[in-house]
Amino acid sequence: MAAPAPAARSAQRIKAHIAFLADDLLQGRETGTPGFDIAAAYVASQLAQIGVKPGAADGSYFQQVPMSGFRSADEGKLLLTPKGGAATPLVFGEDYVPGRNPLSPTTHVSAPLVFVGYGVVGGDRDDYAGLDVKGKIVVALAGAPASLQTEERAYYASGRTKRLAAEARGAAGFMSINTPADEVRRPFDGAVRSWKSWGVTWRDGAGKPFSPAGSTPDLASISVKGAQKIFAGAPQSFADVVKAAEAGTPPRFVLPASLDATLNTELKSVQSANVVGLIPGSDPKLKNEVIVLSAHLDHVGITSPVKGDSINNGAMDNASGVATTLEVARAFAEGKRPRRTLMFLLNTGEEKGLVGADYFARNPPTSWPIVANVNLDMPVLTYDFTDVVAFGAERSTLGPAVQRAAARSGVKLSADPMPQEGLFTRSDHFRFVEQGVPSVFLMTGFANGGEAAFTTFLRDHYHKPSDDLSQPIDYAAGAKFAAINYEITRELADADKAPTWNKGDFFGTLFGKKR
Ligand SMILES: [Zn+2]
């Protein structure tokens, strides 16, 4: 029998990687579990086998990431005191679910309430204008104005961004309130069901858990029912506030009430590692610049059973992205050396809030600057794709580079088919963006059956035990995706100039000066 063609061999390797990583033995690769550590050992062994050097600072393949786990220890206690009235407790599970504080097992804040609309500060918008929130508890609507560009809106809607704005103005605590529309999209029942789940953050050299806006703790998420109690006697009713918010500009005012909040948080230590491989650049100058290819290795572990299966194998999320990255690494290790230095990051903690990538981007195991990140997360490989989507491509010179590479592979680069999802802010590359690094997030596109494949995946398999090998995985499509990613990386590694943000780009302007 003739030897298989290179593409067929590549497809076989991708199949082998996904089969190992999605095996039940790995128990869903949750951060901090032995299953994740087995996956990390496998990936490190593969990198060694194909001749990719260890990339961690200690000379190993493992960048240790010290982490802290945190969850609510109990239902907490929220006492609302209307002006001139008696204190009444808000009801757990009906009015609120408690926040969690990674910095302390007990949190007590007692202060007047100020409503800041969406709590967005940026561009020419300042939802705090004219309000003094120093020492007060800030109450903000969930989400952000619909008039904002979708990716900017996702950034402003995040709790992290909002709490940082509240902290900068001296707020003592923060609460987010749902609108009726929020509760149609994400029923409050869901928040009630998962109130006991663990959050994870990384710890710094002194062992302190990282908590953005640590002096303005997240006290609670408030339901529509709870909001009605909080807005009782306010200058405008909650219903009127919601109506104005839907039109774009909610009012903002001091609420005639104060809150006494007590939270108890259970803390635990978690240890995990990013796997890092390195291919040194060949150019005497350009080798001092680093391109990072990333794909998260962790997944969501074990959850309550669906049809008797409780192991979330994460074949597409993200064994497929890891397998693709290993194939790109192999192609570079066996082929012509890149001019710039390449780092391959198979990271931990993505499903916990992009924690491993955040740690890596803030503590890169190299003194050379990272000039670009290409991230692969959940490429759906169940069909023969004919286009790819590069989220964020229009923001930097990475766009034209991806376009040229895709064209060489006979594949089209398409625009974001789901702008309403704000996906550019939702995977690991965004932690590089926050450090000023031009980045793209690459996925298989909607053409040639892609839209149906993607929709089916999201509906039936995303973060479910059925994201496993029983899906109709097209391993040849996997080989093709690896070939395109090789071309993209080649383009970035060998170009005379490092990628740059486009002039005036929103994220480039916000973070680019950090570089
Ligand atoms: Zn996921």
Image (tube, rainbow, N blue to C red):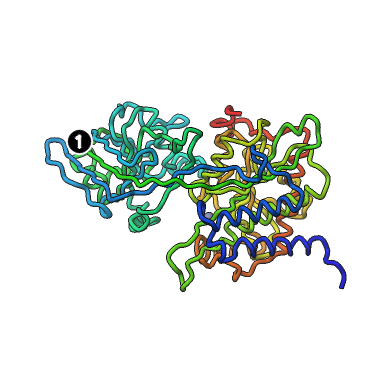
Q: Residues within 10 Å of mark 1 (few under 14, many from 20)?
A: some
Residue at left offset 71%, top offset 45%: 402
Judge from the rendering whether residue 308 lies leftward or rightward of residue 176; answer left or right: right
- State the residue in front, 26 or 210: 26
Q: Where is residue 418 in the image (x, y as percent from the top left)?
A: 55, 53
Location of the C terminus by quadrant is top right
Query: Amino acid type of disc 1?
Result: Pro
Secondary structure at badge 1 equals strand
Percent from the top left, x then y, of residue 359?
A: 55, 39
Please tell me which residue is depicted at 75% across the width and 49% down the height of the picture. 486
Q: Kindly identify the residue that appears in the image at 59 percent across and 30 percent down.
A: 512
Residue nearest the viewer, comparing 287 with 65: 65
According to the image, label 1 marks what residue?
A: 256
Instruction: Please say if 388 is above or below 167.
Output: below
Can residue 415 be spotted in the picture? Answer: no
The answer to whether 373 is drawn above or below residue 480 in the figure is above
- Percent across and percent down for residue 52 are 74, 47
Q: Which of 310 and 133 is in front in this view?
A: 310
Quadrant holding the N terminus: bottom right
Q: Is residue 280 visible?
A: yes
In the rendered view, does 6 fall on the left or right side of 275? right
Is 212 positioned to the left or the right of 238 in the image?
right
Which residue is outermost to the right? 2
Q: In which quarter of the image is residue 103?
A: top left
Above or below residue 429? Residue 443 is below
